[in-house]
Image: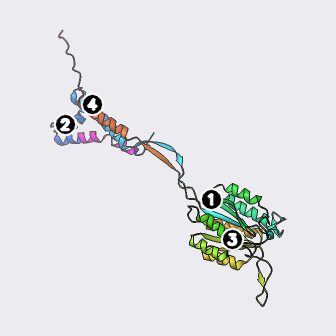
Amino acid sequence: MTLAWWWMLALMPVPWVIARWVKAVDAGDRLDHPVLARWSAGGTSSGGPSAVHSRWLWLAWALLLLALARPQTLGPWVEPEQPARAIMLVVDVSRSMEEPDMEWDGQRVRRFQAVQQVVGDFARERQGDALGLVVFGEFADTQAPLTPDVEAVRDLLFDILPGMAGDSTAIGDALGLAVKQLRDQPVTDPVILLLSDGENNAGELEPMAAASAARDSGIRVHTIAFGQQRSGDFFGIMRGAGVDVETLGRVARETGGELFAAENTDELARVYDRIDALEPSPRAGQAQRLAAEWFWVPALAAVLVIVIGQHARVPRRRRRAPS
């Protein structure tokens, strides 16, 4: 039990001060106000009716001050819930992700192994968010719908094998599937992170059509071009099978997102650090304690004391028999 306004108890001597001041003003005359007369009679030792009523009034005054001090009991500390951010991870698992051209902890690893490490660390840090996972190759597939269990999404990512969805790259279909997953959920500020190391060469939906659907649904898409970029000769003829940065950039701009490029594992880790800053996880609000107010108990007691005090009787003293 605590007192929210404990300083109210400092008003306890106020009636006594007022009574003394009135006495001084009246210069010894009888107090006309009956209540003040009873207050001032509290200091007498006559034991008469005024003194008795004064004691009841002092008790009522103390109870009223206790009520004004707001006695309360405090519950346990609770943190207000914060809205979670909804993020769909869209990851390329086409055959090209098997290329052993990346390095992790000083060892040569395949592209998808590097993605697993970096994206896995990113997922683990998204505590409080809802994550989903869509993978794509020749076709797109939802591995995990939106869920607050970020560790489960991370585990699913490590269970995936590159090439399981075919050799081609259906960026448009994957993006469209992720948009559908987010659009069907009652979420705010949804985000898609799309990573690919190739160009759209499969599927039925064009990447820009999927990007338009994301824009119309209020979904922001950040795209990550992972691996070597395509290049061209003097005649503008494209050569090489690198990532299509131009298309990924258009998708990001269409939805209000950003394009990131990474050619190695270190750059990919920095990209996800930047995205983590752009899309921060919700922070817990200030912890609070719920309070149960008990002011009504002393207030009710004060009313009862006043009523009882008005009807209190002073026992008559027995007269001694003359000796």
Task: Give the Cα distance between marks 2 and 4.
Answer: 17 Å
What colour-coding does the image apply?
Answer: rainbow
* Above or below for 228 versus 90: below
Q: Earlier in the sequence, mark 1 or mark 2?
A: 2
Task: Give the Cα distance between marks 4 and 3.
Answer: 82 Å
Residue at label 2?
34
Q: Position of residue 185 (x, y in %)?
A: 58, 61
Q: Residue furthest top?
A: 323
- Label 4 crowding class (10 Å Cα cut-off): few <14, some 14-19, many 20+? few
Secondary structure of the residue carrying tag 3 is helix
Quadrant location of residue 158? Answer: bottom right
* Above or below for 122 versus 13: below
Task: Give the Cα distance between marks 1 and 2.
Answer: 70 Å
Residue 212 visible at all: yes
Mark 2 vs mark 4: in front: 4
**Which amino acid lies under the numbered mark 1 shown in the image of this protein?**
Ala
Q: Earlier in the sequence, mark 4 or mark 3?
A: 3
Quadrant location of residue 284? Answer: bottom right
Q: Between residues 40 and 110, which one lies in front from this camera angle? A: 110
For the record, the magenta segment spans 6-19
Residue at label 1?
130
Label of residue 173 in the image: 3
Q: Residue at x 29, y 36 (%)?
A: 303
- Label 2 crowding class (10 Å Cα cut-off): few <14, some 14-19, many 20+? few
Secondary structure of the residue carrying tag 2 is helix
